[in-house]
Image (cartoon, grey):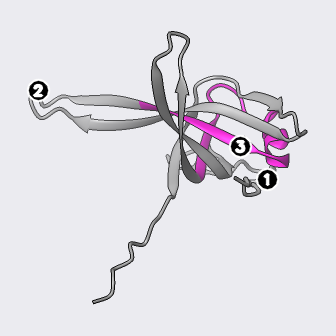
Amino acid sequence: MSEMRLLEQNLVLLAGRLGGDPDFRMTSGGRGVCNFRLAVGRRFKDPKSGEWKDDTAWVRVEVWGDAAERLKDKLKKGSPVHVEGRLKYYEYEDKAGQKRNGLDVIASRVQFLVKSGSEGGSRPMAGKPADTELEEVPF
């Protein structure tokens, strides 16, 4: 009997707003990286109280290369964006010596969003590039 092979997928799609201005820096190898925190909201009805509540997840996003340099001046606190990317797991030791871990999203695409007048949805900004294609980050 042959072993069944699991199809692995690592794809993240998020829409939200920047929680602060992005942080841009150059690596020692001369490559740009732009980091920002994205607030992704969820509205749900509390089963106990019957009231509608809001829940916000904060997600760290990394953008690499030329795209990071293009985005650093276009993104700001509160900017609405759609992000496509993949998850990256990491481990580190905090200042107290405790082992910690986390997940970041490595963006492959960032699309700027704005409210459309009467339609109530979102669309790309008029007169500006709708999205920025990002190069794959080598690991």
Please say whether residue 76 is one of the residues in the magenta stretch: yes
Q: Nearer the viewer, mark 3 or mark 1?
A: 3
Going from the N terminus, do you reach mark 3 or mark 1 first? 3
Query: Alpha-carbon distance for marks 2 and 1?
Result: 44 Å
Q: Which structural element holds mark 1?
A: loop
Question: What segment is highlighted magenta in the picture?
Answer: 57-84
Going from the N terminus, do you reach mark 2 or mark 1 first? 2
Q: Image quadrant of residue 36? A: top right
Identified at 12% across, 35% down, the residue is: 47
Q: Which structural element holds mark 2?
A: loop
Please say whether residue 69 is one of the residues in the magenta stretch: yes
Residue carrying label 1: 129
**Res 11 label:** none
Measured from the top left, where is residue 111 in percent x and y?
A: 66, 50
In the image, 115: left or right of 8? right
Amino acid type of the residue tagged 2 in the rendering: Ser
Q: Residues within 10 Å of mark 2 (few under 14, many from 20)?
A: few
Amino acid type of the residue tagged 3 in the rendering: Val
Residue carrying label 3: 63
Measured from the top left, where is residue 94 in percent x and y?
A: 53, 17
Query: Alpha-carbon distance for marks 3 and 2?
Result: 41 Å
